[in-house]
Image (spheres, rainbow, N blue to C red):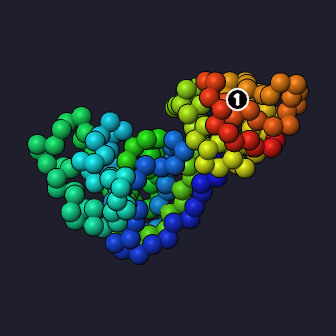
Amino acid sequence: PPYRWILIGPARSGTGLHVDPLLTDAWVTVLEGRKRWILFPPAVDRRAIGMDPDRPQIPSSIWFRNWYKRCTDKHWPKEWTPVEVLQEPGETVFVPAGWPHAVLNLEMTVAVTHNYASEAAMGKEGLRKMWWEVVEMEPAFAARWRRAMQKHRPDLAAALVDEEEGGKGGSSISMKEEGRDISKRATV
C-alpha cells in the first residue's frame, strides 16, 4: 500500500488513537526527538479506550491526559494490557496490523514511517481481506497492485482474485468475493 511519510511535529503533537489503514503493519523510525507510544492488542474493546466510531479521533495529547490512567489502572483487564514505548532517536517501532495505538511527540520530532502488507504475518486469509478493502477503498491502486502481483507473485494474484472468463492476460479484475459481486471494476 502507498503509505510512506516523513513525520515532523513539535512537542505535544502526534497521532490520536487509531488503527493503521488496510490491515497493514507499519514501522516508524525516529531520526530526531522522542515519541511516547501506547499500543493495545486487537481484542481490546475499542470504546473502552476512547475509539468511538461515531465521534472524531481524540488528539494524542488529550488522550494521554484523559484516558491513559484509566487504561493502565491495576483494575484494567489483563487481556487488554497495552504496550508502552518511549522511542528515542535511531530506534524503530513496529506496529502490528490491527493494533490500536496513539503516539505523542515529547519534543520536536522527525521520523520516517512506512505501512506495508506482510503475507507472513497475515496469511492468505488476511491478505484476502486486505485485498477486498483496497478494492473497495482504492480501486485504481488495486488495479496497479493486481498487475504487480501477476508479474511478481502470480500465486497470490490467483489466490486473491478470479480473472474474468476469457481474460487470458486479463483486461479487468472480477470484483467477486465468495460469489458476491461488489459492483466495482478496475482496469488492469
The residue at 59%/31% (across/down) is: 128
Q: Is residue 91 left or right of residue 155?
A: left
- Residue on which disc 1 sits: 161
Q: Nearer the viewer, residue 20 or 6?
A: 20
Q: Is residue 69 left or right of residue 105?
A: left
Amino acid at circle 1: Val
Structural crowding at the residue carrying mark 1, measured as other residues with C-alpha within 10 Å and reported as few (<14), some (14–19) or many (≥20): some
**In which quadrant of the rendered image does the C terminus lie?**
top right
The residue at 51%/41% (across/down) is: 23
Residue 104 at least partly seen: no
* Residue 148 spot, x, y in % from top left: 77, 39
* Residue 124 spot, x, y in % from top left: 58, 26
* As drawn, 71 above or below 188: below
The residue at 86%/29% (across/down) is: 167
The residue furthest left is: 75
The residue at 52%/49% (across/down) is: 21
